[in-house]
Amino acid sequence: MSPEDIKNLVESNKIILFTKGTKDQPMCGFSHHTIEVFNQIGKPFECIDIFSDPSVRPALVEYSSWPTTPQVFIKGELIGGCDITMELFQSGELQKKVEAVFAATEA
């Protein structure tokens, strides 16, 4: 996978998470918590397991300039990792961002 492939994934999905493990089987606590937040919001999102292909992680880091996972993108924008996602969720800002993405496409 290349940084261009990552860009295409990010731009073609409303919400995409790059995680350690899958939606059903996260392989680290940070990925688990991040996935759980999006499950609670209840809108569709994609998850890419960085362990499924060894070329994903280096391409992701090159694309985002963010060294850790999970990485959350909403409407093409890097939101951040688990800590930022949790802070935004607890303040209600994450839900607003997600709702805005879906409201824009449903209108």
Image: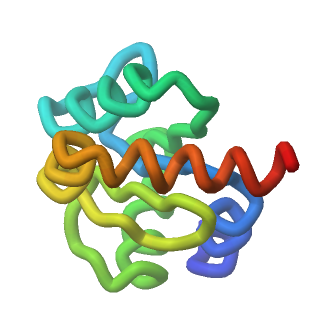
Q: Residue furthest top?
A: 24
Q: Quadrant of residue 66?
A: bottom left
Residue 99 as seen in the image, left or right of residue 103 = left
Foreground residue, 90 or 85? 90
Residue 99 as seen in the image, left or right of residue 93 = right
Percent across and percent down for residue 62 are: 41, 83
Q: How many marks?
A: 0
Above or below 35: residue 106: below
Residue at position x 22%, y 73% in the image: 67
Percent across and percent down for residue 105 are: 82, 51
Foreground residue, 53 or 67? 67
Above or below 30: residue 18: below
Above or below 27: residue 102: below
Foreground residue, 57 or 86? 86
Percent across and percent down for residue 84 are: 19, 58
Foreground residue, 101 or 31? 101
Above or below 12: residue 58: below
Residue at position x 43%, y 55% in the image: 54
Percent across and percent down for residue 18 are: 43, 50
Residue at position x 17%, y 41% in the image: 90
Q: How is the image coloured?
A: rainbow
Q: Quadrant of residue 89?
A: top left
Q: Quadrant of residue 31?
A: top left
Q: Quadrant of the N terminus?
A: bottom right
